Structure formats: structure tokens, C-alpha cells
Image (tube, rainbow, N blue to C red):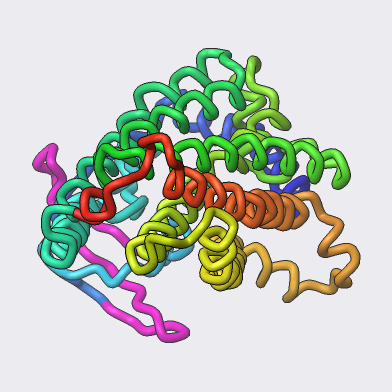
Amino acid sequence: MNKILISIFFLCLPVSALAQDAVGQMESRQVQGEVLEIQDLSIIDGYRQMKFQVRGDDQKIYDVNTADSYLEGLRYNIQPGNRVILQIFPEADGSETAHLADAVRTNGLLWVLIVFSLLILIVGLWRGLLALLGLGITVLVLFVYIFPNILSGADPLNTVLLGSAVILAVNLPITHGFNKMTAMAFVGTLAGLALSVLTAKFFMAMSFLSGLGSEEAVYLTWQVQNIKADGLLLAAIVLGAVGVFDDVAINQATVVAELKKADPNLKTVQLARQAMRVGRHHIASMVNTLVLAYAAVAMPLFLLFLNSDVDWVAFVNTEVVAEEIVRTLAGTSALVLTVPISTWLAAWIATDKHGASFDNEEFHR
């Protein structure tokens, strides 16, 4: 399916070029503006199609018909006062035609961010504020270090591993405090990263994945010559599992801390075994969570294939589907192995007789 779409894209290029010649090599441009009024409205298949006027930021008035726009203007629920993005096409006679290209959603996204932050602060209080700080650091590392370095030709896997280690090394102490249990949780997450690399490499080799299963990957490797698709897929699998390792390691460290607090006489083996009972429940819930998360992201793809005449074997064998399966199972396999590693590390440090014991209250403040 992805190869068909790419072929159509390249076949359409000459048509676009001829159309451009017809208007004297004049290029289209984008203009933002405010919807003034809805001139005509019709309901088709439960969605609105309309004609409306827009006052562009260039102070021109544009008439727009969503039926002529991309996917009928994506069938947005446009209202007067909304801001939209128009694609303006010059015509041979000197006039211009305006098509609805997109909605301006930055204000809406800002409100989403504000509501999200308020919920975190109201429920999490001081820890919520620290969590938001950690989230900001994660975004900073992604867009300042990881993504730019990959685009500049650095090895994707090494870049993601280093960036992930920095994210974990900063976020764990910020959100959970500076103590020995946090240090052990950090070691557990590093073990999870190493395991995710091994499982991802093994699963990718077994599945003959090239990393070119999606149109985005094909276009990126065509546009940026120094990026290897298989290395990018491997790095993406590892990066996607980082947050889960953090959650697992901290959860098991918390369980160990509570068990030790309840019964200070527990030995390392007893402590680890009791904590693993909780860890197994965590594994069961997290496995389901990861599968559902990846399935939700790939839902349009799955529905597209299931709606076609492709049989199940051919469906699963398609690389874009195989990528999602491997992405899910590789991260989940590393997660399963990280639980006992984190548990035994926490149990060992909690029962150490040489002054390395942790302060339960400090860990939970």
C-alpha cells in the first residue's frame, strides 16, 4: 500500500509541473485569515461543507468553497471568527483562487497545554510541578540534541541512547528526589535500555525489517541522504520504551521501600520475591497498555488493510504492519526483563549492611 501511494505521488509530479507552466511558473502561497461569514452550508454524510469569506492577514477578502479544497477542506466545523490557513493559487487571467488548507489550531493547543498543566499541578502539587519541569527537559533534549544530531548525520542509536540517559539522569532525581533508591532505579533503566537494543536488533533481524515501511521513512531517507532507515527504526523502538522503563524502575523501587518499611527484618531474597509479586501485576497491565497504545497510533492503517481484500497472512507480512508488531514486542520484552533487574537492585540496596540503606521518607517526599 505504501509503495502504491509513493508511486502515485511521483506520477503526479509531472502533472503539477505542467499546471505550473500553464500559469506562467507562478507559485501558490499560503495566507492566514479570519472567517467573516458562512455564505452557504450543506450537510453531506453528516459533515459540513460550506462556502465562506475570509479576511486574510494581507487584508484581502477571499471566497472559499470547501468542496474544492483538499478532502472537502478536511470537513472542519468552521465558524465565523475562526482562523484558517488558505492556499492561494494564481490563475492564468491574473485572478486568484483560495482553497482551505488547514485550520489555525495554535490557540487551541495552548489551551490544551494550560489545562493539562493545571491538572498536573492540582493533583500532583509539588511533585506535579517537578514532573512538568522534567517534561520540559525531555522536550529540550529531544529538539535540541537528539533530532538535530540525527539530521546532521550522527548514528541514530548512539544519539538516542545518550539522549535517553541524560533525560533519565536528570528527570529521576528531579521528580523522585536525590537518594540511593533513585540511583538504583536509574541503573535499572539503563539496563532496560541495553535490553531494548538487544531485543529490537534481534526482532528486526528475524523479521527482515528495512525501516522503510512508512511513507515518512522513505521520504526522509530520500531527502536526507546520511540517514539509514534501519538505524532510525532501531533508535525509535528504543526511544519509545524509555518512559516505560522509568515507570517500572520507580514503581519497583517504591514497592521495595514500602515493604522494607513495613518489615525491616526482611532479607534481600524475601524482599525481592515479595516485590516481584507486585511487579508481575505491573507487567500484565503495562503489556496491555503498550499494545493498546501502539494499536491506537496505527488504527487508520489497520482499518485500511482490514477493509481491503488482503488476507491476514499478507496483512501481517506487510512491512509497515510488521514494524508496529516488532516495535510493540521488542519494547515489551525489554520491559518484562527490566522488572526483575530493577527489583533485585532495589532489594539489594535496601538490605545492604554497609551503610547503603535508603531513607524511605526521603524517597516518598
Q: Is residue 272 left or right of residue 7?
A: left
Percent from the top left, x then y, of residue 112?
Answer: 21, 60
Question: Image height check: is 168 above or below 154?
Answer: below
Residue at x 41% of width, y 35% of height: 354
Image quadrant for the C terminus? bottom left
Seen at 59% across and 38% down, the residue is: 191
**Residue 90 percent across, percent down from the top left:** 36, 37
What residue appears at the point 32 percent right and 42 percent down from the top-left corner?
Answer: 88
Q: Main secondary structure of the magenta part?
A: strand
User: Which residue occupies the foreground of this view, 145 or 316?
Assistant: 145
Residue 319 shown left or right of residue 174 in the figure: right
Residue 178: quarter of image: top left
> Position of 4 compared to 41: left or right?
right
Q: Nearer the viewer, residue 20 or 202?
A: 202
Using the rendered image of the protein, determine whether residue 143 is visible from the camera's viewpoint: yes
Residue 111 in view (yes/no): no
Q: Quadrant of residue 303?
A: bottom right
The residue range painted magenta reads 41-66
Name the image quarter holding the N terminus. Answer: bottom right
- Out of 355 and 206, give the one closest to the viewer: 355
User: Quadrant of the rendered structure where residue 87 is?
Assistant: top left
Taking the magenta stretch, the answer to whether it contains residue 120 is no
Is 51 colored magenta in this rendering?
Answer: yes
